[in-house]
Image: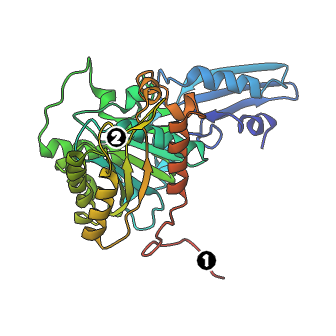
């Protein structure tokens, strides 16, 4: 292996999160002790990562006194080889999360109704899991009410390598949302079959990589999208978000019940907007007991323990950070709500992963 090639192994493609040398992007033309002539082949024309890759490559090769570097583009044959490598030899339009041997833990975050802070919590939870060192993907499945791109400050859509989409990465989280494909905040008016197809494409046509967690922001309620996801992501576990209010809790109970109907397991309940901290103590603006009520009701329905995992207070800081596109767990990790969300992420990461029925590639010889 040449010196230049070895040095370029430190250059990571920011979209694929792998060394450019492993992705077939480097071609050394000539190399001498003090000079090197090479090509770096980008996946597509106009690759948004081009400048960073070139800058990092020149930095890696700084020990050469003369570097002749040409930035070019892969041929179709080279792109096909790369796509096959990324898919691990699996066919196109392949859903990796539905396979028996897949170890990614899929977590649905749902609520019975809108306005309970589900998407804000989902965005911060995904980022918190990534902060703990996990490889995380975030699927914004709230087709009609998508908000994840804005909450994570993402302004660019996925890069397309032919039919394969490379999702944007924010705060070490791979993100996919219908919001990347909608212009000027136009409303989406789709029926069931189109919703199912969109969700299916987000799972089969996106390069998610090797994830520890795929966090899915569900739309409120128990409609077409929830049913489709239950079919496409068997074995997913659910978090149910509610407020303390009795009316919200009753609706959230229905949302949690859908997990049992599609074969999933309820990880627990999160009570958001539980109280407001004031100089005179806690004020329970939306009442109390909703989260515990949902947890007990789901225990009765599922026959399994359903814990109340967290009670998060009303927080103007959480709202402001989300509006700014900078999750609170990043902008202020010392904020009380930020610490509660990180604690929630730690609880989830400590949840044992069921391996029953999964094939482990272990050779006993």
Is residue 16 in sight in this rendering?
no
Q: Residues within 10 Å of mark 2 (few under 14, many from 20)?
A: many
Q: Please tell me whether residue 19 is drawn above or below residue 295 in the rendered image.
A: above
Between discs 2 and 1, the one toward the N terminus? 2
- Residue at image position (29%, 57%) is 293
Observer-nearest residue: 255 or 59?
A: 255
Secondary structure category for the residue under label 2:
helix
Q: Quadrant of the N terminus?
A: top right
Q: Please tell me whether residue 263 is drawn above or below residue 13 in the rendered image.
A: below
Single out the residue that lies furthest toward the front: 280
Single out the residue that lies furthest toward the bottom: 365
- Residue 363's label in the rendered image is 1
Query: Residue 341: percent from the left, percent from the top?
Result: 50, 43
- Residue 175's label in the rendered image is none
- Residue at image position (34%, 40%) is 118
- Disc 2/disc 1 C-alpha distance (Å): 43 Å
Query: Residue 255: percent from the left, percent from the top?
Result: 24, 53
Query: Residue 229: percent from the left, percent from the top?
Result: 27, 53
Single out the residue that lies furthest toward the right: 33
Q: In the shown orientation, is residue 276 left or right of residue 141?
A: right
**Which quadrant holds residue 33?**
top right
- Residue at image position (51%, 54%) is 212
**Which quadrant holds residue 41?**
top right
- Residue 118's label in the rendered image is 2
Q: In the shown orientation, is residue 93 left or right of residue 320?
A: left
Single out the residue that lies furthest toward the left: 191
Secondary structure category for the residue under label 1:
loop
Observer-nearest residue: 277 or 213?
A: 277
């Amino acid at each position: 292996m040449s010196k230049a090639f070895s040095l370029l192994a430190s250059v990571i493609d920011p979209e694929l999160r792998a060394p450019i040398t492993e992705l077939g992007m480097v071609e050394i033309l000539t190399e001498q002790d003090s000079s090197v002539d090479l090509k770096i082949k980008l996946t597509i024309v106009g690759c948004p990562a081009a400048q960073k890759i070139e800058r990092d490559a020149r930095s890696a090769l700084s020990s050469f006194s003369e570097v002749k570097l040409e930035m070019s583009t892969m041929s179709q044959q080279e792109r096909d080889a790369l796509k096959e490598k990324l898919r691990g030899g699996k066919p196109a339009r392949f859903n990796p999360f539905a396979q028996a041997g897949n170890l990614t833990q899929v977590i649905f975050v749902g609520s019975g109704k809108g306005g309970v802070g589900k998407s804000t919590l989902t965005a911060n939870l995904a980022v918190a899991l990534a902060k703990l060192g996990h490889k995380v993907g975030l699927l914004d499945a709230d087709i009609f009410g998508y908000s994840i791109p804005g909450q994570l400050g993402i302004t660019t859509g996925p890069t397309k390598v032919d039919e394969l989409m490379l999702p944007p990465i924010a705060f070490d989280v791979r993100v996919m949302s219908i919001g990347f494909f909608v212009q000027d905040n136009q409303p989406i008016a789709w029926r069931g079959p189109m919703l199912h197809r969109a969700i299916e494409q987000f799972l089969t046509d996106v390069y998610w990589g090797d994830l520890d967690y795929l966090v899915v922001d569900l739309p409120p309620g128990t409609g077409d999208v929830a049913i489709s996801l239950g079919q496409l992501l068997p074995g997913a576990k659910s978090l149910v978000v509610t407020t303390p209010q009795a009316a919200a809790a009753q609706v959230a109970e229905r949302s949690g019940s859908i997990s049992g109907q599609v074969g999933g397991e309820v990880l627990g309940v999160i009570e958001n907007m539980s109280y407001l901290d004031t100089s005179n103590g806690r004020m329970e603006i939306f009442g109390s007991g909703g989260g515990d009520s949902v947890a007990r009701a789901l225990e009765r329905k599922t026959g399994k323990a359903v814990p109340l995992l967290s009670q998060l207070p009303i927080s103007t800081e959480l709202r402001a950070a989300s509006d700014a596109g900078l999750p609170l767990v990043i902008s202020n990790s010392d904020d009380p709500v930020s610490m509660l969300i990180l604690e929630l992420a730690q609880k989830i990461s400590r949840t044992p992963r069921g391996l029953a029925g999964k094939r482990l590639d272990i050779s006993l010889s």
